Amino acid sequence: METAIAFIIIFGSIVFFHELGHFIFAKKAGIMVREFAIGFGPKVFGMTKGETLYTIRLLPLGGYVRMAGEDLDSTELQPGYRLGIRVNDANEIDYIVLNQNKQFPDMLFLEVEKSDLMKEMFIEGYDEEERLVRYKVARNTILNVNGQESFIAPYDRQFGSKTVGQRSMAIVAGPLFNFIFSFFIFLALGLFQGVPTYEPVITTVLPDSPAQSAGMKDGDLVTKINGNPVVSWQELSDTIKANPNEKMDFTIERNGETFDVAMTPNEVVAGKEKVGQIGVQYTSPLEKNALKAVVFGGQQTYEWTKNIFTMLGNLITGQFSIDDLSGPVGIYQATGVVAQAGVFNLMHWAAILSINLGIMNLLPLPALDGGRLLFFFFEAVRGKPIDKQKEGMVHFVGIMLLMGLMVVVTWNDIQRFFF
């Protein structure tokens, strides 16, 4: 149960910030956002505020921001169609009922002759006395279809009416907010847990090791190796690894005293390399400093972004197998393990997942944000958009391929964890 709660909170938060990026920049561009959804499938909770429906849906595996004009949601009123209308004090239509089941005391009825609910914003038709009348349609008119209400979307409020730059920003903002979210998580870790100093302080000396034989103890600070200054644990580790079976002199500080010890690192095989080890473990001391926490947030976001791109490169070049990938089942299992290690480890895991989601969405693949950005690039180069039907077909094929990949990855996860 704890794993399920942790998974929902973490994944829900990551998805929320991703979709929040799309939402904010869509609104900034003047695009009508019809729905802001966390999750997929049946609606669990819904609330309408302004022109947007905010929903939480059953399957916590993603989310979406539905913008006007993206899904061909414009309504065309065919000639001969009978509808109910409500007219405001400015003699403009502000409510349209397509099924005529909803009644108002002052509702009028029209048989449509011609109309335009996107650009010219009018309806012309015959009233109940067979007179040809024409009404202007207000920009905030509500459309009622089978009891479901929504605002009409004038063309200038639709996604397709905006410039390539505005549309691109509305799309790229989702992954961008994932990186921002990760930065703030790392910043919070730096503020509340502390920033690692990476000082070359020995945390634990293992038994029957060269370090123990030489007299090294827990808490020793290594200041020099072979007379050369050592300022970080990474520098200490790299020097030891590079010198297997080579006698080395260590300068140690302990309780205010300085002395030298000598030892020879054991030779061990790590992957395809032979490296040196002296038998010590390390946990960096932590320092609480606001300025360093900001720097730490930026550094960690950059480092994990670089690491994930490196893993992607290894996958492309065949150094990393598809069997090593994890889907929702694998992430769920890993979240349970991390949750047992404490809230700070869970926050760190959430930051990594957020960066991963941001990068994955930026890949130039159909159906992903990166794929849509690629079509915008082609549009900018050509000077005109790609045919919507062709673009839709490409995205549809992309969705099918991604679903197939998800099935394979999920099956691998199930075999790995349950068989």
Image (spheres, helix red, strand yellow):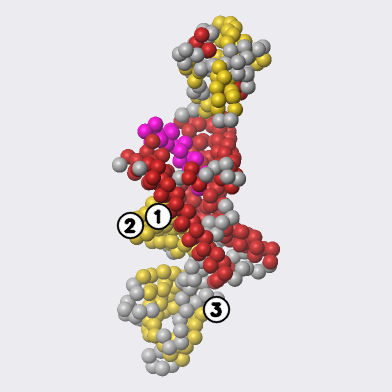
Q: Mark 3: which amino acid?
A: Glu
Residue at horizontal 46%, vertical 76%?
Answer: 75
Query: Does residue 308 appear to the left or right of 9 in the view shown?
Result: right
- Is tag 1's residue or tag 2's residue first in the polypeptide sequence? 1
Q: Nearer the viewer, residue 283 or 51?
A: 283
Write down the region rendered in magenta.
Answer: 338-357
Residue type, numbered disc 2: Val
Q: Position of residue 15 (x, y in %)?
A: 45, 50
Which percent across, then down, holds residue 208? 47, 12
Q: Earlier in the sequence, mark 2 or mark 3?
A: 2
Q: Which residue bears the numbered disc 1?
A: 39
Q: Nearer the viewer, mark 1 or mark 3?
A: 1
Q: Is residue 7 above or below residue 273?
A: below
Q: Is residue 114 above or below residue 72?
A: below
326 up-or-down from 142: above or below: above
Label 2 and label 3: CA atoms lie apart by 38 Å
Given the image, on which type of amino acid does mark 1 rest?
Gly
Q: Is residue 351 visible?
A: yes
Q: Which residue is mark 3?
A: 120
Which residue is nearer to you in this view: 280 or 69?
280
